[in-house]
Image (cartoon, rainbow, N blue to C red):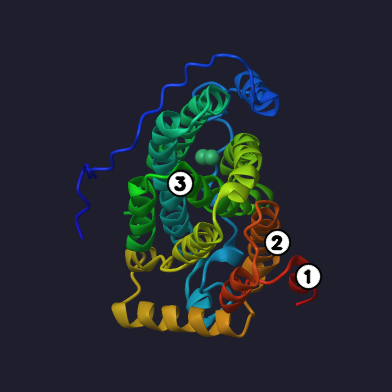
Amino acid sequence: MAFPETVTLVASVPATFDNNFAVRDQDMRNLYEKAKRDQWNASTDIRWDKDFDPEKGILPEGLIDIYGTKYWERLNRKEQLELNRHFSAWRISQLMYGEQFAMLVCSQLVNILPTLDSKFFMATQVVDEARHAEVLSRYVLEKLGVAYPLTSSLKNLFDQILEMPQWYLKTVGTQLVAETLAVSLFRMFEQHSPDPLISSICKRVLADESRHMGFGMLSLPEQMQELSEKERDEVEDFACEAAAGLLGGQFPREAYEAVGFSKAEVDDIKQMRHEIAQKNEYVFFRKYFKKDFHSSLWNNMSRCGLMSDRAIARLGSMGITAPQQAAAA
Ligand SMILES: [Fe+2]
Ligand SMILES: [Fe+2]
């Protein structure tokens, strides 16, 4: 399927001018100070020429669905590395679109947020997300040599968040849920990728992401307390929906097709992956990503007052349980 060069969405947001220039939220100003202090440059702070060696592989092999199966054994080492390159390009492409989405939604937030303290910080997140989109796209285009389209499940979620008028729903979808997931992915890639270049990029991105999640934690809890019970239920539902939207529909079909698997084989791989996930034997993913994401999401939603019995049941149906239960699983 051809992917259009640009996609335009009409998503108007209110623009609030804050006439009070005094500092009213010192914690938010401190976060803004940290953001100014810790800026980095994707052109000069990444060792683009020194670190990359595709012969070692890109992302951890254990993440590739067919790793350890008959399909994997059938490939010679060169073909396994080629599949890793396409798989990694597919996976990092999704993050690359996510970074551009984050830049767009944060630029909306600069307008909507009610106070100058939070607008100042959010202006820095716009720059951070531009840098993340820049660094990941450069890696994908220059090093991996192939980019893949955004999945429809992510596109639907991004569009929905861009169209929402309330700042707190955008923040729940972006800083609370999507960035919690992105941090777990970046952390796993940073610690376990055979390629030191992507590992160093993820390390840089993670340092910025902790500020972004910090914005959610500083701004959301108080706002959630001001909502009616009905409104808070809607926010909780949306947080669960966003988590489902991020986790679903993420099968890299095009990467398998690119290395010569037939449609029937790719269907079989998809089915196999589903069965493995059901049996909870998807070891690498479970060990490094799932546990981390589930406990972070649980903790962050709890801190924002978004963990009623309804949310617990809804997350439970997605296999997301309280951290101590997850640890025992
Ligand atoms: Fe980012
Ligand atoms: Fe971010």
Q: Quadrant of residue 262?
A: bottom left
Residue at image location 61% in from the left, 76% down from the top: 313
Residue 224 location (% of width, % of height): 59, 50
Q: Is 65 or 74 nearer to us in this picture?
A: 65
For marks 2 and 1, give the CA distance. Answer: 9 Å
Instruction: Measure how far apart labels 3 and 1 are at the Cα level.
Output: 30 Å
Q: Is residue 150 above or below residue 64?
A: above
Q: Is residue 111 left or right of residue 279?
A: left
Q: Which mark is residue 170?
A: 3
Disc 1 marks a residue whose amino acid type is: Ala
Marks 3/2: CA distance?
22 Å
Q: Which residue is drawn at 46% across and 42% down?
A: 167
Q: Residues within 10 Å of mark 1 (few under 14, many from 20)?
A: few
Q: Is mark 2 on a helix, strand or loop?
A: helix
User: Does 93 sit above or below residue 107?
Assistant: below
Mark positioned earlier in the residue sequence (3 or 1): 3
* Residue annotated with mark 2: 295
Q: What amino acid is found at the position of numbered circle 3 in the picture? A: Lys
Dot in front, 3 or 2: 3
In this image, 35 relative to 252: left or right?
Answer: right
Closer to the eye: label 3 or 1: 3
* Some atom of ligand 2 lies within 8 Å of the CB belonging to the residue at label 1: no
**Which three-letter amino acid code belongs to the residue tagged 2?**
Ser
Residue of label 1? 327
Q: Is mark 1 on a helix, strand or loop?
A: helix
> Mark 3: which secondary structure?
helix
Q: Earlier in the sequence, mark 2 or mark 1?
A: 2
Q: Residue furthest front?
A: 228
Label 2, ligand 2: CB separation under 8 Å:
no
